Amino acid sequence: MQIREKLAAKGYRMTKPRQEIFNVLCHAPQSVLEIMSNLQKKKLQIDKVTVYRTLTSFVKLGIVEETQFKDKISVYELADQKHHHHVVCDTCGKIEDIELDENLLEEAAKKSSTFQIKSHHLEFFGLCRKCR
Amino acid sequence: MQIREKLAAKGYRMTKPRQEIFNVLCHAPQSVLEIMSNLQKKKLQIDKVTVYRTLTSFVKLGIVEETQFKDKISVYELADQKHHHHVVCDTCGKIEDIELDENLLEEAAKKSSTFQIKSHHLEFFGLCRKCR
DNA sequence: GACTTATTGCAACTCATTTGCAATAATACC
DNA sequence: GGTATTATTGCAAATGAGTTGCAATAAGTC
């Protein structure tokens, strides 16, 4: 399903800002600041409020996923992928995707907790090749 | 080592606010707001700036650990325990500690990533007994 | 092409956390 | 114990990510 159809299915419209923000997100997981700067590089004047609102809509529609890192800034990336986690470089902030066998994880958690576990958040930190 | 000694070892001083904030943290992992409210219950007037600064010092000294949850509020708890993770109730926000076999985790991550992995952040979300 | 209403952009706001600075109080030294 | 040194406190003001109100604009519909 194209992004335009996903939007239309819920009464959302396809606009230039939405298209451009989507395009920018195709390249890498990014924070709002990075998205803004990438839009500016393409000579596109889009307000940050629009970026925030667009991302919120995209998340609602399942087009984008939001992740919080320890510095409290949200990072957004296209959601058309498998469930996965991130490795963040302590030095340069670069983000790499990583896939793990989740079963172990939630299994183990369910055994050790009195809570009914529904989801989790997992991120790794370290050094990327360049910064090592 | 007592907290006073840990402080002194780095040129920090033991003060009433620090002692009280430490006492409050003995009971449970808490956010700054909760710490403030617990201090007020004890009729202690301590400025929130002082709470923030004290927590920063405690973290530097390894007395306290800071964890970020997805709603972006930091939660602080005494660090004199084993490395562990948290389960947060989606409804009431209650936090429970959980211990897991970490080896699996970092092993698996090291295999799948080009990064040199140094640490990780893992939290679970779900429902506690009451809220289920 | 005109109409309806979602979307945009601006300004102003929120809320957790931080910073500057003068007043205060722990420690060290006599 | 009294005093000097300097870490710490509390207040006010600033910061910075993210949100909200509202009038102007522009998709999609007929």
Image (cartoon, coloured by chain):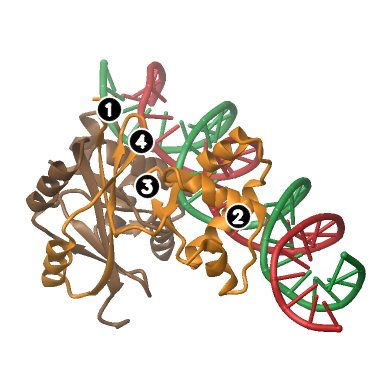
Chain colours: A brown, B orange, C red, D green
Q: Nearer the viewer, mark 4 or mark 2?
A: 2
* Element class at badge 4: loop
Q: Residue at x 40, y 61 (%)?
A: A34
Cα distance between the residues tagged 1 and 4: 37 Å
Label 2: how many Cα within 10 Å (few below 14, some 14–19, many 20+): many
User: Label 3 amino acid?
Assistant: Phe
Q: Amino acid at mark 2?
A: Arg
Q: Chain of mark 3?
A: B
- The mark found on residue A11 in the picture is 1
Identify the residue at horizontal 32%, vertical 81% (top origin). Answer: A131
Chain for numbered disc 1 = A
> Looking at the image, is mark 3 or mark 4 nearer the viewer?
4
Q: Position of residue B22 (x, y in %)?
A: 53, 52
The percent position of residue D13, horizontal first and vertical second, equals: 75, 51
Q: Between marks 2 and 3, how big is the CA–CA gap?
A: 24 Å
Q: Is residue B66 found left or right of B52 in the rendered image? A: left
Foreground pick, B59 / A47 = B59
The residue wearing badge 2 is B18
Q: Position of residue B44 (x, y in %)?
A: 66, 40
Q: Secondary structure at mark 1?
A: loop
Camera-side residue: A98 or B96? B96
Task: Name the residue tied to disc 3.
Answer: B69
